[in-house]
Amino acid sequence: MREKRQYRGRLRQIGICFGKLVRMFIFQNDWKSLPMAAIIAGLVTFAIGTNMFKTQEGTLSGCFAIACVCIWNGCFNSIQVICRERPIIKREHRSGMHITSYIAAHMLWQMLLCLAQTLITLFICNLAGIVFPRKGLMSTSGIGDFGFAMFLITYAADMLSLAISAIVRNTTAAMTVMPFMMMFQLVFSGGLMPLKGAPEVLSNFTITKWGLNSLCTLGDFNSQPMVTLWNTMWQFREFDMGGQKPVKLYTDYVRKNGMLNDFLQESGKYSMNDAYAYTLDNLVMCLGILIFMIILFVIVATIALEFIDKDDR
């Protein structure tokens, strides 16, 4: 009777479920998520280039790409973990397994997995020559702050997929829903295109928006130069207007007088974004929303599984 009480204890059940997840990681090829994270990070950092944290355009595109890597990793971590063993969960729940213990074990395991993927991504970024800001907003380490933000983005996406996996009936349904969820996260993030009106409101419900905002904040986007205007003007150097080439005259004047850096810096002031303000309050708000989303997704997953006995699917 004593052993039975121990098994039914919530804390002991967390340990049992956690051990099961470790065995699945080793023996059911779930470990492949780690090398896959390295491959994805390598491909993305190769495409980013070396302008990240040097220009506004480079910082925005680079931070968006890293946020996408985090979303991708988190989504694939848990999109199938619950629905693929739904009959087992139903049987064990009827035998006394607590759903809260089951979800808590997944939270702990996925937390470790997301942490490992974050470290791998940072390592790949370092190999690719991406130089993170040396000073952070929350701590003295810029790369430490970036790592924490990337971890929260990955973990939020992971818990979202966990909730979806708890709701859908099988792995086929889960993999059908995932592309639409990924598309929503990317399109309504504000990183691909400017959003106004209803689309801007919808963007508040995406992990990507708040993740991108936190990364651009840490990258001090607003203090960096903008090169788009200069590059566009350079393409029109030969534009002729009444026998004159005003764009060529102006660009030559700027270069000859050593004013190019001043021009680029001044251009950056006209594309500053309040959402990327380099302040601790702004960063805390973005990260706080990600933490709120994590808690919300965990609650949804728990409620969905609490009714699994009534599910005849």
Image (cartoon, helix red, strand yellow):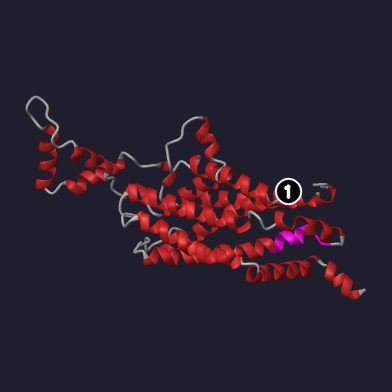
Residue 6 x %, y %: 84, 72
Instruction: Name the residue furthest front.
Output: 172
Quick one: label 1, few (<14), some, or many (20+) residues within 10 Å?
A: some
Which residues are the magenta region?
A: 97-105
Q: Is residue 243 visible?
A: yes
On the image, which quarter does residue 146 sit in?
bottom left
Residue 196 x %, y %: 46, 32
Three-letter amino acid code of the residue under disc 1: Arg
Q: Is residue 296 visible?
A: no
Prevailing SS of the magenta stretch: helix
Helix, strand or loop status at disc 1: loop
Residue 230 x %, y %: 22, 42
In the rendered image, residue 152 lying in the magenta stretch gets the answer no
Instruction: Name the residue furthest right.
Output: 1
**Residue at left 81%, top 47%?**
311
Instruction: Name the residue furthest top.
Output: 242
